[in-house]
Amino acid sequence: MGGWAIAVHGGAGVDPNLPLERQEEAKALLTRCLNLGISALRSSLPAIDVVELVVRELETDPLFNSGRGSALTEKGTVEMEASIMDGHGRRCGAVSGITKVKNPVSLARLVMDRSPHSYLAFSGAEEFAKQQGVEMAENDYFITEDNVGMLKLAKEAKAILFDYRIPLAESTCGAAAESPIQMNGLPISVYAPETVGCVVVDTQGRCAAATSTGGLMNKMTGRIGDSPIIGAGTYASELCGVSCTGEGEAILRSTLARDVAAVMEYKGLGLQEAVDFVVKKRLDEGQAGLIAVSNKGEVAYGFNCNGMFRGCATEDGFMEVGIWE
């Protein structure tokens, strides 16, 4: 065993013109979440508890697009989704179509621990949440002024937007059209990371992963992305834990998270080699990023787009928080 390791992300695909103030806010949140996870690991909390704890913190802060501050559907409502997986026994839980649960990742954990199923969605998931006494809130709690404005822009542009990272005063459809960098066919000035996630290996070598998102701005109601899909947006095994972010449809097609574990197992690649391989070989023309840990206490990340909000730390004292290459 190589000791504990942790990584967090706030999404891949970042506007190079993102205001410095927003960059610093994002890095401060990632640092806070890293320190929260580090403290829990030093207290001998199991990996599965740590990933839930950290993602709850990310869901509660409206800076990134998960929980409070989630992107809005075409109808102006929130439909959130999340998943969690314990590599020890490959247990998992996932939820989609969540409109009133404050922390979808904890509902996913309850699906794993207290239901006979692995995945619940929409009214069935929310009925289960009520049965379990999960903290709820009306849909308005999750909606921010920034998101309302970005939904208006999305409808005017007849496009799907990926969150609200650029202040509205600095982002217009006309200016967006001039951007040469694109994510999912959209100018990156109106794209921002749509997902948060955490991966952890604890001192016992147990790996876990969790991912949560509000999805796409102006998405069709009922749309399900990669984040709640085990093997696509989230995966953990005895070898590693992985959480992905980026163009959800591309991640789904490539079963990106599972493929990291697969090439480690079947090709004998190390963690960073496996991450680099799947990002380069499995996404076709899609753009995405991911974070990963191994049962040896290693941490890795990779992305093929313009930046990824991420942070990572290991028991030997290494710590990094960054956005760009």
Image: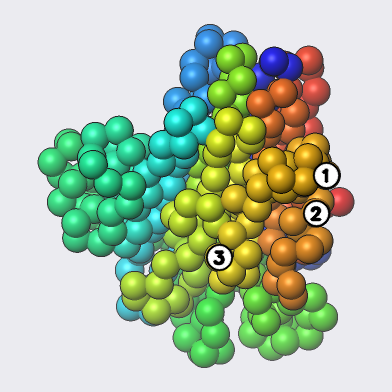
Q: Looking at the image, tell me whether mark 2 or mark 3 is earlier in sequence order.
A: 3
Q: Does residue 58 sit above or below 31 in this rendering?
A: below
> Is residue 213 visible to us here?
no
Q: Badge 1 is on which residue?
A: 273
Checking the image for residue 81, the label placed there is none
| Residue at 40%, 72% in the rendered image | 223
The structure residue drawn at horizontal position 74% and vertical position 75%, both measured from the top left corner, is 285
Name the residue beneath numbered marker 3: 252
User: Residue 85 location in percent, x, y?
Assistant: 47, 39
Q: How far across and how far down the image is residue 54, in percent?
A: 51, 33
Q: State the SS at label 1.
A: helix
Label 2 Cα crowd, 10 Å radius (few <14 / some 14-19 / many 20+): some
Determine which quarter of the picture holds residue 251: bottom right
Q: Specify whether 14 is left or right of 57.
A: right
Label 1 – label 3 distance at C-alpha: 21 Å
Three-letter amino acid code at disc 1? Glu
In the drawing, does residue 51 fall left or right of residue 224? right
Viewer-side residue, 175 vs 137: 137
Q: Position of residue 23 (x, y in %)?
A: 72, 50
Task: Pinpoint residue 102: horizontal percent, then vertical percent.
Answer: 32, 45
Disc 2 target residue: 277
